[in-house]
Amino acid sequence: MATEHDRRDRLAAERGDTPLVRLLDAARDRGLQVTRTPNTTTPPAPVTVTTIRVGESPHSVAVSPDGSRLYVSDFKADSVVVVDLSDEEIVDTIAVDGGPYGTAVAPDGTRLHVAVPDTELLLKVELPDDVSASHFGHAPYGVAAGPDGRRVYLALALEDRVWVTDQFAMSDFATVHGLDFPVGVAVSPDENYLYVTHYFSDQVAVVDLERTTVISTIPVSDGPYGVAVSRDGARLYVAHFPFDTVSVIDTARGEVVDTMPVGGGPRGVAVSPDGTRLYVTNFFAGTVSVIRL
């Protein structure tokens, strides 16, 4: 019988997704076994407002602070696609090299941070299209920007840690240890907490940023990948790749309160600034789903 590792291996090989292959190899080297955690709720299907065609293999998504733009990293196309949300049309494509993974927009909306694990780069895009690169010798899988724009959080999945640095990957503000293959990262609006997905152990870690310590873990279903936090900090949204669901977590209770079925390999997730829309990248379908909350 095929295991979940087998399925992910096959999907990674078919897509030429070398960062995922490296992650799977590292898990195999540790002798990890992947088990599937059943959902305890059976919610109604979400309302998909629309599906936006964005490219070949959309990995992660970020939304501008004013809610007017989506920025979607397209792994195989070596680009970041810019979508105007007023008409849900692509208005620009920013060329980047090396297979972009995580992406985050600065709180003032003037720049993007893009993680490129294969080439160990953190890219900074001064919008609309001025790209510069910082090579720092580590493979960043996920990226988040702090609410004041000063700190950038990088998920170093192969090193079991999150590094807190600046937009140039030069400052060493802090390191969060004690993580388990962290791939997705999100910061609470008050920057008190960091939420980190543990891809193989089916958990979301909650980090106290003042102490840079994991204070709890939240069990979720298999394959937690991208994560986003609502503007009021009350909800987390976790994409499960390649298992076609998004979990909704109540942060006060520290538990899953809803599960949204989606399709096409959900990988990245972002919430609109007004909290009314959820954007989910469908890695296999080449689309972003827009879900009414």
Image: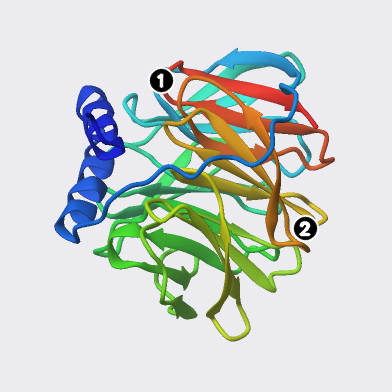
User: Which one is earlier in the sequence, the residue at label 1 or at label 2?
Assistant: 2
The reply to whether dot 1 and dot 2 touch (C-beta < 8 Å) is no
**What amino acid is labelled 1 in the image?**
Phe
- Give coordinates of residue 219: x percent, y percent: 56, 56
For the question of whether residue 178 can be seen, the reply is: yes
**What amino acid is labelled 2 in the image?**
Gly
Q: Is residue 252 left or right of residue 94?
A: right
Quarter of the picture holding the N terminus: top left
Give above or below for 229 relative to 137: above
**In this figure, which residue is indicated by the disc labeled 1?**
284
Quarter of the picture holding the C terminus: top right
What colour scheme governs how the chains and residues are painted in the rendered image of this protein? rainbow
The tag on residue 233 is 2
Q: Quadrant of residue 250?
A: bottom right
Give above or below for 90 relative to 260: above
How far is disc 1 from disc 2 in space, using C-alphas? 30 Å
Residue located at (42% from left, 60% from top): 155
- Give coordinates of residue 40: x percent, y percent: 64, 42
Q: Quadrant of residue 88?
A: top right
The tag on residue 37 is none
Residue located at (54% from left, 22% from top): 92
- The 10 Å Cα crowd at callout 2, few under 14, some 14 to 19, many 20 or more, is some
Question: Which of these two is toward me, 101 or 46?
Answer: 46
Question: Which of these two is toward me, 140 or 47?
Answer: 47
Residue located at (69% from left, 74% from top): 192
- The 10 Å Cα crowd at callout 1, few under 14, some 14 to 19, many 20 or more, is some
Question: Which of these two is toward me, 48 or 201?
Answer: 201
- Give coordinates of residue 18: x percent, y percent: 22, 39
- Give coordinates of residue 33: x percent, y percent: 27, 51
Residue located at (45% from left, 26% from top): 265
